[in-house]
Image (tube, grey):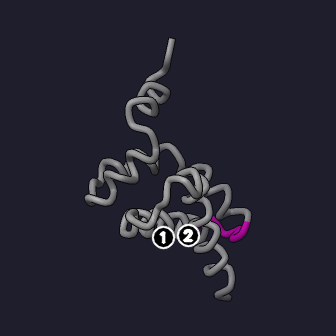
Amino acid sequence: MLDSTTTNRRLHPDRDLVARMVTKDGAALDELLARHERTAYAVAIGIVPDPTRAERAVSQAFLEAFCQAERYVPGELTVLAWLTSLTRRHAEAIAAVRS
């Protein structure tokens, strides 16, 4: 028996959610967050050990993904790889700023 998460991923693959984000579909962003926020946070906390700053990196990465979804190229990276690369870049920028 399939759980609801597996069923939802089959009905709405990640790349389809990104395509919906191009049209500024907030529900698509919410679904990607639900699927990949933990992984993105794990990447961020590995770079920025402060939980608040790591959460900020994740928020900035997903905001960038939402605002610039048209830049995602399906053949280059999986959606998860794209999101984690955005997260890594934001976390590195936050880590570079000493506060």
In the image, farthest residue toward the top: 1
Q: How many marks?
A: 2
What's the residue at 54%, 48% (across, down)? 36
Residue on which disc 2 sits:
57
Please indicate whether residue 19 sits to the left or right of residue 7 in the image.
Answer: left
Q: Where's residue 5, x and y in %?
A: 47, 29
Q: Where's residue 60, x and y in %?
A: 48, 70
Residue 67 on the magenta segment? no
- Which is more toward the observer, 22 or 61? 22
> At label 1, which amino acid type do we have?
Gln
Residue on which disc 1 sits:
60
> At label 2, which amino acid type do we have?
Ala
Please indicate whether residue 79 sits to the left or right of residue 30 in the image.
Answer: right
Tell me the CA gap for discs 2 and 1. 5 Å
Q: Secondary structure at mark 1?
A: helix
Please indicate whether residue 67 sits to the left or right of residue 6 in the image.
Answer: left
In the image, farthest residue toward the bottom: 98
Circle 2/circle 1 CB separation < 8 Å: yes
What's the residue at 61%, 59% (across, down)? 84
Q: Label 2 neighbourhood size at 10 Å, few (<14), some (14-19), many (20+)? A: many
Q: Bounds of the magenta span? A: 47-52
